[in-house]
Image (cartoon, rainbow, N blue to C red):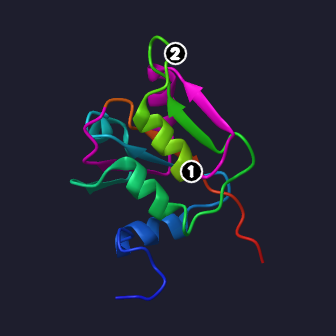
Amino acid sequence: MLTGIHPLLTGPLLAHLDAMGHSDAVVLADAHFPAERLASRLLLFPGIATPDLLAAVRTVVPLDDAPAVDLMATPDGSRLPVQDELAEAAGTGEIRFLGRQEFYDVGATAFLVVRTGETRVYGNVILRKGVVPS
């Protein structure tokens, strides 16, 4: 155990987050996301909700300049409760919404994809790492 580290942040996840450079992206994806097909690096966190994991990741990852956070847009443009939770966990009001296919395209270029156990649809977020302040 380490002190000061959120308990959802495992050693492999921390190692990947540390290896990310400025503007590299991590996708925190719901259980419906085609992670096996799109990811070059994949971690599985079954049983964990995406907003909970995002809140944990944000304890160690600073945000890039806008747009630092992307959510997957619903077809009708409505905002779902899980998206509100993701926005709150991200800790920024600057959220960009991408259509499903565009989200997949951007997600396929991400440094890391983490598939959670989130079963609510549109429970996906792309987070870009900023510069760690000195």
Q: Does 94 appear in magenta?
A: yes
Q: Mark 1 or 2 closer to N-term?
A: 2
> At numbered mark 2, what does the secondary structure look like: helix, strand or loop?
loop
Task: Identify residue for label 1.
Answer: 90
In the picture, measured across the screen, residue 45 lies left or right of residue 78, that is left
Q: Residue 25 appears at what percent x and percent y?
A: 55, 49
At 60% across and 42% down in the image, what residue appears?
A: 69
At 52% across and 15% down in the image, what residue appears?
A: 77
The residue stretch that appears in magenta: 91-120
At 46% across and 54% down in the image, what residue appears?
A: 54
Q: Is residue 25 visible?
A: no
Q: Quadrant location of the C terminus?
A: bottom right
The circle on residue 77 is 2
Give the image quarter of residue 52: bottom left
Extreme residue toward the top, this view: 76
Q: Quadrant location of the N terminus?
A: bottom left
Q: Is residue 111 above or below residue 80?
A: below
